[in-house]
Image (cartoon, rainbow, N blue to C red):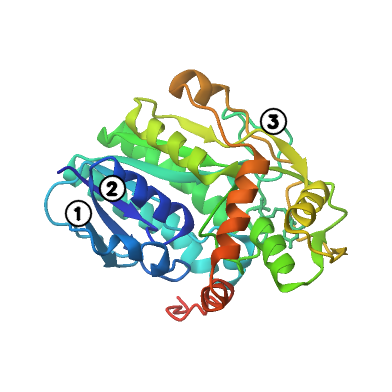
Amino acid sequence: MEKVLITGAAGFLGSHLCDRFIKEGYAVIGMDNLITGNLKNIEHLFELEQFKFYNHDVSNFVHIPGDLKYILHFASPASPIDYLKIPIQTLKVSSLGTHNLLGLAKAKNARIIVASTSEVYGDPTVHPQTEGYWGNVNPVGPRGVYDEAKRFQEAITMAYNTFHGVETRMVRIFNTYGPRMRLNDGRVLPAFIGQALRGENITVFGDGSQTRSFCFVDDLVEGIYRLLLSDYDQPMNIGNPDEISILEFAEEIIKLTGTSQKIIFEDLPVNDPKQRQPEISKARSVLNWEPKIDRAEGLKITYDYFRSLSDEELYAKEHNNFSNYIKR
Ligand code: UDP
């Protein structure tokens, strides 16, 4: 069996990628330090012989015995609230961590895909965002620790590609949602659904005119899978171009959940991008990929998932205690 290493395996995207690669017939090594990840997301895989879990922080040297076919580097905090709580780890995992994994890819002659982000475009002045746009990022703002680490990640990944001849792939991920998201990481969809489930008001930041474009996780995973198997080594946007304002999005969630709560307006976070929409013609032409699941369908699946959780599971989703958090 060919072996795949997936970092961030206990996280939202990492766990779905583990499922996909198991389904495709690979042996999967899942790696996570469980700071923001949760073993619940992958506990169904523990009984499988072809799945192994390593509790490890990839910012430190990564040792894997034997051969590796692919490495998927998806470990990183990924929400503005997390960056504020763990800014140094956020910087390290996409810089030192990426360096370690590129070194591992080189040593094993493995192909590596790194998770980049629409945040490399910052608060964009080009709309929709094409891969050729270089971005508008504030390096010292609250998002700087994430945005600049991801920009460095792309730079070092390209350098390993050109200098060492490592086979690299880079996916720029736009807002993605689906089952297994945490309810307490501040991201808008779990925030709204959590508020609806608890009978609280729905908090729209600013006037809600800022836009996002939400991709359902299964579509994203399909795009990542195709990109990894392709021979395309430049950054590629994967996301759903269906753009919506946050105020309209709040109204959709109210309708979906049937909550009787109201929308309340709170301060807009610093450097919150005003608009975001992926331009995906590259993915369409190179990968023959486009999203298939529209927001109505994806939101229903996601809401049904959260509703199916027991009180205990919901509590765990809301109270990530950062118990492994060491301040360094
Ligand atoms: N947002 C909001 N209410 C919330 C949480 C987020 O209005 O309770 C807004 C946030 O200000 C941003 C958008 O929703 O404009 C998406 O936020 P998220 O943190 O999910 O992702 P990102 O800003 O990184 O796209």
Distance from label 3 to label 2 (Cα)?
A: 35 Å
Q: Which residue is mark 3?
A: 128
Q: Which badge, 2 or 1, comes first in the chain's sequence?
A: 2
Could you tell me the amino acid type at mark 1? Gln
**Image coordinates for residue 146, horizontal then vertical, percent:** 55, 56
Q: Is residue 233 above or below residue 221?
A: above
**Quadrant of the image occupied by residue 207:** bottom right
Q: How many marks?
A: 3
Kind of element beneath mark 1:
loop
In this orientation, does residue 214 appear?
no
Q: Which badge, 3 or 2, comes first in the chain's sequence?
A: 2
Of 148 and 40, nearer the camera is: 40
Q: Which residue is mark 2?
A: 22
98 vs 272, left or right, is: left
**Image coordinates for residue 228, horizontal then vertical, percent:** 36, 34
Could you tell me the amino acid type at mark 2? Ile
Q: Is the residue marked 2 within 8 Å of ligand 1, measured from its CB? A: no
Query: Mark 1: few, some, or many residues within 10 Å (few <14, many ≥20)?
Result: some
Q: Is the residue marked 3 within 8 Å of ligand 1, measured from its CB? A: no
Kind of element beneath mark 3:
loop
Q: Any mark on residue 141, and which? A: none
Q: Confirm or deny contact between disc 2 and disc 1 (CB under 8 A).
A: yes
Q: Is residue 282 above or below residue 199?
A: above
In this orientation, does residue 237 appear?
yes
Q: Is residue 137 above or below residue 92?
A: above
Of 213 and 57, nearer the camera is: 213
